[in-house]
Image (spheres, coloured by chain):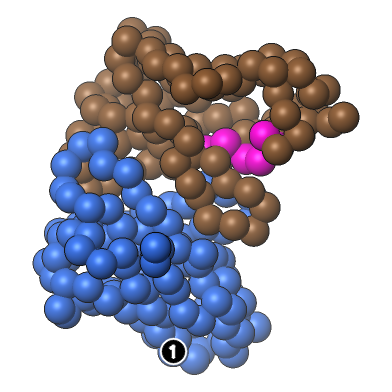
Amino acid sequence: RKEVEQDPGPFNVPEGATVAFNCTYSNSASQSFFWYRQDCRKEPKLLMSVYSSGNEDGRFTAQLNRASQYISLLIRDSKLSDSATYLCVVNPYNFNKFYFGSGTKLNVKP
Amino acid sequence: GAGVSQSPRYKVAKRGQDVALRCDPISGHVSLFWYQQALGQGPEFLTYFQNEAQLDKSGLPSDRFFAERPEGSVSTLKIQRTQQEDSAVYLCASSLNRGVGNEQFFGPGTRLTVL
């Protein structure tokens, strides 16, 4: 079983839509969680960290559910520029190793 | 400011050749990671350095893969006797400190194609 699993998509949504992705992780001892964004043929870039109490950054909201071992990312009022692959990242039990999901592809269409 | 740089950006190797991939992390960053990203997949952890010490190399797929960071800054990932399955993008990332929650900054990657 993979450490981190994501729905690969693609999610095709119109501009202005709200879209949500989930990501599940297998290690209950996981300590830290992130969402990274990766544009086609580019390097991943940090979108946001995910905190236990949930956190929001503008149109983006991240949630953590430790009991069910998943994290979510909600994007409101989607923009064309949000089109990318969103990678879920989990740091299981030490800071040395980070596990990436395979990514969820989002296409925002006019 | 200067980010993480990697060279070469593209490398084509014949099967059996040795290759060396270079990573220049952000100046002062203690932690350095190497990842392998196959097409359509997320990055897979290869190895981790804290300064010059290689603290975790559990992700290296075989003994043909070797990484070093002798002075705690620039790092080199070497792949000996390349195979077709080694074809991937190799990403380097650095972070300022050790510790949970530190943001990793990625370089643009080296796209390796083994013929």
The answer to whether A64 is drawn above or below residue B66 in the figure is above
Position in image of residue B45 (x %, y %):
37, 53
Which chain does tag 1 point to? Answer: B
The answer to whether A82 is drawn above or below residue B82 in the figure is above
Q: Quadrant of the N terminus of chain A?
A: top left
- In the picture, one chain is blue; tell me its letter: B
Position in image of residue A30 (x %, y %):
26, 27
Locate residue A78 relative to residue A54 in the image: left or right: right
Q: Residue furthest front?
A: B1
Locate residue A78 relative to residue B69 in the image: left or right: right
The answer to whether B39 is drawn above or below residue B52 in the figure is above
Q: Residue at x 59, y 79 (%)?
A: B10
Instruction: Identify the residue position indicated by label 1 in the image.
Output: B18
Residue A98 visible at all: yes
Locate residue A83 relative to residue A43 in the image: left or right: right
Residue B50's image quarter? bottom left
Locate residue B61 relative to residue A81 in the image: left or right: left
Magenta range is A82-87
Position in image of residue A70 (x %, y %):
43, 18
Position in image of residue B60 (x %, y %):
33, 64
The disc labelled 1 sits on which kind of residue? Asp
- In the picture, one chain is brown; tell me its letter: A
Q: Residue at x 26, y 42 (%)?
A: B102
Tell me if residue B98 is in the magenta stretch: no
